[in-house]
Image (spheres, rainbow, N blue to C red):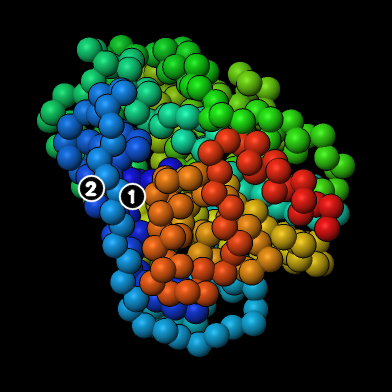
């Protein structure tokens, strides 16, 4: 999902792309919210209209063209030639050896406001006294440091007596995005050699696993990449950053492009051949970063009129041809199913 802090800023810089861009998502935009308070310091009331979204995209400079699939060219640290590979990403990717190597396609999903129709971090705040956070806590947020801020939120909830059971109950009740269960059913019904299914989210393991297990969707996903979170002996949910990286576009704790580049490169090596196509289903500004690395045969599925979709549109307008992937906006998961049906038949 997209927005200030964790999901709302995509900044330009060096990477494995054909161009350098800078995108700024104004803090006023919030489809999602512990989100709104990340920069505004105020709660978003459910049912209120979001502020207009007006991303600004600026071309910085054009670099060389490359014939190599973008996802097989890891981003590099400025001034160095070695690819950026986080230790956590390497460890998790290396565990994929038991996944069958005959999958034709790989499909990545975001979680908040893609699979579920809410933001899990926002919804857990319902467990707080008065269903909101105190102003002094909101004021501790600093741009790019959302993960650290959320750790303080979880500590506060524990101090207020919010239990593991309280949080799990909230997560299990998160509403599914329209048509998403239909999309899951489609993926399950396909021949086993069709889809490798991976979830990449800046939420956390407890929130995601709680929802997936409650809905019976956990077995669909071959891999889940997200911030680890476990309860300590005092009953507090302790969340840690997923990894560190050098991408200047993304929050310090997660760059989804680094995650999927590492994973696809590792799986391609294990399989001995590339995937026929790569699909990415998301909604937010931090889903735009990985979508930039998709190739011309791949498909980006941005949720219509959400930050990912609007940033892709801005890129097409400012730099025609530089966003390589086919773009298929969706309102319902059924829109994704319709396109996948056609592609798998080719």
Residue at position x 37%, y 22% in the image = 124
Lower position in the chain sequence, tag 2 or tag 1 = 1
* 310 displayed left or right of 111: left
**Residue closest to the eye, 182 or 213:** 182
Disc assigned to residue 8: 1
Please indicate, yes or no, whether residue 127 appears anywhere in the rendered image.
Answer: yes
Residue 144 visible, this angle: no
Is label 2 in a helix, a strand or a loop?
A: loop
Question: Residue 26: x and y, percent?
Answer: 24, 52
Q: Kindly indicate the quadrant of the structure image that contains residue 332.
A: top right
**Which is nearer the eye, 45 or 106?**
45
Farthest residue in the bottom direction? Answer: 64
Residue marked by disc 2: 27
Q: Position of residue 53 (x, y in %)?
A: 30, 48
- As drawn, the residue found furthest toward the left would be 136
Which quadrant of the figure has residue 52? Answer: top left
In contact (CB < 8 Å): disc 2 and disc 1: yes
Left or right placement of residue 75 versus residue 101 in this view = left
Residue 61 vertical position relative to residue 171 in the rendered view, above or below: below
Q: On the rendered image, what quadrant is the N terminus found in?
A: top left
Task: Give the residue displayed 71% in from the left and 52% down from the top.
Answer: 106
Q: Residue at x 50, y 16 (%)?
A: 173
Q: Relative to 176, does residue 249 appear above or below in the rendering? A: below
| Left or right: 147 as drawn, with respect to 28 | right
How far apart marks 2 and 1 lie (CA) works out to 8 Å
């Amino acid at each position: 999902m997209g927005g200030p802090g964790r999901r709302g800023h995509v900044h330009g810089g060096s990477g494995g792309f054909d161009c350098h861009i800078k995108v700024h998502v104004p803090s006023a935009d919030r489809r999602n919210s512990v989100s709104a308070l990340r920069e505004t310091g105020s709660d978003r009331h459910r049912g209120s209209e979001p502020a207009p979204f007006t991303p600004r995209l600026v071309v910085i400079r054009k670099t060389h063209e490359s014939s190599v699939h973008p996802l097989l060219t890891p981003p590099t640290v400025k001034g160095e030639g070695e690819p950026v590979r986080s230790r956590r990403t390497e460890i998790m990717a290396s565990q994929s050896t038991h996944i069958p190597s005959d999958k034709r396609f790989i499909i990545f999903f975001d979680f908040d406001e893609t699979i579920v129709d809410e933001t899990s971090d926002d919804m857990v705040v319902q467990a707080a006294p008065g269903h909101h956070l105190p102003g002094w806590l909101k004021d501790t947020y600093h741009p790019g440091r959302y993960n650290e801020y959320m750790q303080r939120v979880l500590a506060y909830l524990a101090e207020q007596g919010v239990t593991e059971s309280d949080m799990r109950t909230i997560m299990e009740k998160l509403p599914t995005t329209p048509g998403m269960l239909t999309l899951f059913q489609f993926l399950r019904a396909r021949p086993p050699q069709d889809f490798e299914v991976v979830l990449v989210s800046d939420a956390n393991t407890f929130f995601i696993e709680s929802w997936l297990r409650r809905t019976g969707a956990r077995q669909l996903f071959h891999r889940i990449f997200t911030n680890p979170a476990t309860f300590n002996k005092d009953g507090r949910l302790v969340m840690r950053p997923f990894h560190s990286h050098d991408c200047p576009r993304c929050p310090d704790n997660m760059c989804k492009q680094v995650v999927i580049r590492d994973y696809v490169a590792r799986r391609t090596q294990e399989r001995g051949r590339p995937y026929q196509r790569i699909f990415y289903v998301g909604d937010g500004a931090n889903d735009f970063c990985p979508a930039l690395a998709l190739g011309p045969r791949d498909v980006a599925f941005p949720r219509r009129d959400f930050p990912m979709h609007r940033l892709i549109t801005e890129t097409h307008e400012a730099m025609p041809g530089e966003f390589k992937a086919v773009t298929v906006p969706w309102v319902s998961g059924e829109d994704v199913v319709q396109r996948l049906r056609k592609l798998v038949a080719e």
